[in-house]
Image (tube, rainbow, N blue to C red):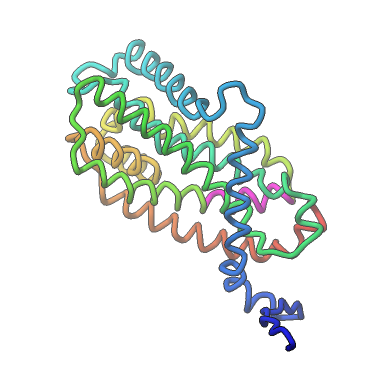
Amino acid sequence: MTPVVPLREELVIEAGRTESRYWRDLWRYRELFAFFAWRDIAVRYKQTVIGIAWAVLRPLVTMVVLAFVFGDLAGMASGEKVSFHLLVLAGQLPWGFFSNTLTAASQSLVGNARLLTKVYFPRLMIPASTLGVGFVDFGVALLLMLGMMVWLGVAITWQALLVVPFLLAAALVTFAFGLWFAALTVTYRDFRFIVPVVIQAGLFLSPVGYPSDKVAEGTMRFLYSLNPLVGVIEGFRWALLGDERGVYWEPFCMSMGLVVLLLVGGLWYFRRMERTFADVV
């Protein structure tokens, strides 16, 4: 009896067909996406002495330094109803996710240069997979945050669940910027040096080490709050600590609208440059 051979979907590469199938290919190659994400997680902590514990040490050290600089030296800790260290750590959670993932995304295509020149797959998967490492690091840091809240006697309420939509907003911001920097770094290697400068400046232009109400009210506060990470960080503090300051919703919604436009533009630019990656990487 002749065995029945299951039919397999063929990948046909022809002029004008790749674009029409591209978004369907993203779903077809979903297992490859998971492999990239898992590989990035394994590589990050490979041959390290304490492994994933670095995901705890980095936000912990940053929290101590920022709390000392802004809280003790600048005197911004006075008048706060909860521990200033918790305020800083709550701000460090989304900021650490953004900064670490953006750095990885900007270098992701250059770091996979050999792979880009050998086989076909949707290149969009490479910068997108860096979000996986960011979510793992975030999860570990969040456990640190919750542990400190219990230790300091701060109640964990149902409101903490609202961290999820703010985390998704942080991921949207990170992916939008990551697409641009990943594509630009392939062509212009100067962006390897620009990204750290942007992140360093962003640390002080976002309320990571200080509450956002320290910024003067009025036009200055409105313009400052157009930074989408300002609303994300405010949201984290409100959800986890019940911060009475809440979220400055009007500029936050406007900033997220700009992020959506940035994401659409990033997808368009990435797809436009994708066909040249193998030639210039």
- In the shown orientation, is residue 235 left or right of residue 197? left
Q: Does 251 lie within the magenta span? A: no
The residue sitting at 51% across, 53% down in the picture is 176
Instruction: Name the image quarter holding the N terminus.
Output: bottom right
The residue sitting at 60% across, 32% down in the picture is 45
**Residue 2 rendering spot, x and y as whole percentages:** 74, 87
Q: Residue furthest bottom?
A: 1
Q: Nearer the viewer, residue 121 or 67?
A: 121
Asked which quadrant contains residue 74, the reply is top left
**Residue 43 rendering spot, x and y as whole percentages:** 65, 37
Question: Image height check: is 69 above or below 243?
Answer: above
**Residue 235 rendering spot, x and y as whole percentages:** 29, 42
**Residue 205 rendering spot, x and y as whole percentages:** 43, 33
Asked which quadrant contains residue 266, the reply is bottom right
Specify the principal SS of the magenta part. Answer: helix
The residue sitting at 29% across, 19% down in the picture is 76
- In the shown orientation, is residue 156 left or right of residue 21? left
The residue sitting at 26% across, 26% down in the picture is 149
- In the shown orientation, is residue 165 left or right of residue 43? left
Please give the range of residues in magenta: 176-186
Question: Image height check: is 182 above or below 29?
Answer: above
Q: Nearer the viewer, residue 153 or 250?
A: 153
Q: Residue furthest top?
A: 73
Question: Image height check: is 194 above or below 34?
Answer: above
Q: Residue furthest front?
A: 1
- In the shown orientation, is residue 139 left or right of residue 16? left
Q: Nearer the viewer, residue 111 or 5?
A: 5
